[in-house]
Image (tube, rainbow, N blue to C red):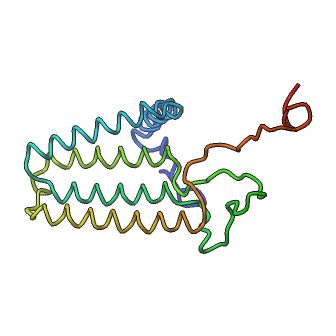
Amino acid sequence: MNFPDGNGHVDAASLPGGQAFAKLSQKYRHYLDKTTPHVAPRWVALALVVLVYAVRAYLLHGFYIITYALGIYNLNLLLGFLTPQVDPELEGPTLPSQREDEFRPFVRRLPEFKFWYSAIKAVVIGFVITFFPIFDVPVFWPILLLYWFVLFFVTMKRQIKHMIKYRYLPFTLGKKSYKGGGKGGKGAGASK
């Protein structure tokens, strides 16, 4: 009999079929980790999965509630991606506010890889749900679409105002290097 450890967890490998699940999980994680440096192909894959989902929903003329839920979920992910990890409204400004402040890169509340991974998982789950007619709830889709656009524009307006107020961009372009007319026409930090 398997008893949980002190934290209440049971070793998955000791359960029936657990070793196979652990091995499969490890292999899945290995292939997922291999995609980490390939940013553009991952986002292209997400775009293709979204396109396949959209074509399926269009051809079925249904699953508007599922599509709306995907839109709301992905909007929430986008907000986490655009928001700093430390909110200056709650914890004070940690981003440089003066030209003399030291460079600190933008740290997101939701990192890019987790954003992509959560979005692709959601769309794949939504795609699988389209095979179950019980989830095809009849609704008047133009109202859902209008409400989603209103929600998107109000949310983005608030986010952009927040970005302007605390002077940050959600994209780190790196520290600026200045080249100028120091002694001999070279900048003070130029290498020889």
Quadrant of res 53: top left
Of 192 and 127, nearer the camera is 192
Q: Position of residue 45 (x, y in %)?
A: 35, 34
Vertical placement of residue 122 versus 153, above or below = above
Of 109 and 156, nearer the camera is 156
> What residue appears at the point 67 percent right and 68 percent down from the top-left corner?
93
> What residue appears at the point 37 percent right and 34 percent down from the top-left corner?
44
Of 154 and 20, nearer the camera is 154
Going by the picture, which residue comes out furthest to the bottom?
90
Going by the picture, which residue comes out furthest to the top?
192
Q: Position of residue 107 (x, y in %)?
A: 61, 53
Left or right, 75 with respect to 129, comes to right
Left or right, 50 with respect to 93, comes to left
Quadrant (top left, top right, bottom left, bottom right) of the C terminus: top right
Q: Position of residue 130 (x, y in %)?
A: 16, 48
Q: Position of residue 46 (x, y in %)?
A: 35, 39
Left or right, 131 with respect to 186, comes to left
Vertical placement of residue 19 versus 123, above or below = above
Vertical placement of residue 124 versus 184, above or below = below
> What residue appears at the point 48 percent right and 36 percent down from the top-left corner?
29
Of 114 and 128, nearer the camera is 114
> What residue appears at the point 21 percent right and 56 percent down from the top-left corner?
66
* Numbered-mark total: 0
Quadrant of res 185: top right
